[in-house]
Amino acid sequence: MTLPAGSDELLVAWLDNELDPARRRELEARLALDVELAQRLALFKQSSLPFKAAFEPLLSVAPVGRLLPPDVPAFSLSRRHLIAAAVGFLALGVAGDRLLMRVTREEENWRDLVAHYMVLYTPETLADTPSRASLETQLKMVGQQLGLPLSVDALTIPPAILKNARLLAYDEQFIAQITWLYPQSGPLALCITHNRDARIAAGSERRLGMNIVYWASVSHQFMVIGHNPEGQIRELATVLQQHIRG
C-alpha cells in the first residue's frame, strides 16, 4: 500500500490494520516522535462516527475534487477516504454543527491527552536502550525545563528498564515524559507538568485500557500510566513519589 507519509489515509489504514508490517513499524516509529501526528491519529481513533452515513448526504455539496484523489469515484468511498474527507469538510466549514463538535472535541485534561499518546506505544517503540550518560543528559534537560531535579538513580525501578526522557509541549505547556519498558506489561511512563491548582492526593483511573495513578504537589502534577495491573501501578507510583519531590 503506497500512501503519503503522515497522510490521513495512512493513519486510518493503520487503524484498520491494512498496512504491511514494515510500513506499520515505520509509522509507529514516527508517531513516537511526532506529537502532532500522534494527536491527529488519536482524534481519528476516538471517533465512533458512522462516517459513510454521515457524509453521503454532504457529497452533493462538497468540493469532492479537492478532497479525494481524482481516480476515486464519490459513490465508492472507503473508510479511509471518508475520514480524510471529514477533515476536509471541517477545514472548509461545510460539516454540521453536531459533527464539528464530535470530532473537534478538546481533550478533557492533560491525562486524557497523555493516554491517547501512550496507547500508541508498543514494546518495539522502546526497543533501544540509551547509555547511562545519554539518559542522564536527557533527564537533566527535562528537569531544568520543569524546575525539578531528575536522575537515573531516582528513576531506576527494577524490573522496569529506563528507556528515555523527553519534553512534549501542548497548549504552551511542557509535559515531561519518562518511559520504561516493563517485562510483562510493556511501555510504562511517568508524566509531569506544572501545577497551577491545589495539591492533589493520589488517585487512580483507567483510560483507553491503561491504569493510571495521579497526584499533584504545590508545583507539579504527576501521573504514572501503563498496562500494568492496578495494584502494580499503585506500587510503582508510591516508589516514584518517594524518589521525586516536586
Image (cartoon, rainbow, N blue to C red):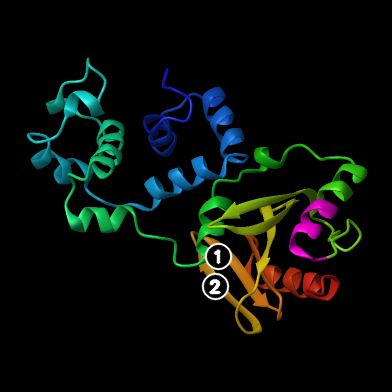
Which of the numbered marks, if any, corresponds to residue 205? 2
Q: Quadrant of the C terminus?
A: bottom right
Residue drawn where x is 67% and y is 43% of the image: 123
Q: How many labels were placed on the picture?
A: 2
- Quarter assignment of residue 74: top left
Whether residue 227 is visible to the viewer of this picture, yes or no, is no
Percent from the top left, x then y, of residue 222?
67, 69
Question: Residue 200 colored magenta?
Answer: no
Which tag is nearer the camera, tag 2 or tag 1?
1
Q: Secondary structure at mark 2?
A: strand
Distance between the alpha carbons at the discs numbered 2 and 1: 10 Å
Question: Residue 142 colored magenta?
Answer: yes
- Disc 2 or 1, which lies upstream in sequence? 1
Residue bearing the label numbered 1: 111
Is residue 114 shown left or right of residue 228?
Answer: left
Assign the magenta stretch its main secondary structure.
helix
Residue at the extreme front: 172
Percent from the top left, x then y, of residue 130?
84, 40
Q: Residues within 10 Å of mark 1 (few under 14, many from 20)?
A: some
Residue drawn where x is 91% and y is 60% of the image: 153
Q: Secondary structure at mark 1?
A: helix
**Magenta residue span:** 139-148
Percent from the top left, x then y, of residue 158?
85, 58
Determine whether 34 is above or below 68 in the image. below
Percent from the top left, x then y, of residue 15?
42, 39
The residue type indicated by label 2 comes to Glu
Residue drawn where x is 70% and y is 53% of the image: 184
The residue type indicated by label 1 comes to Arg
Residue drawn where x is 31% and y is 33% of the image: 80
> Is 199 in front, or is 201?
199
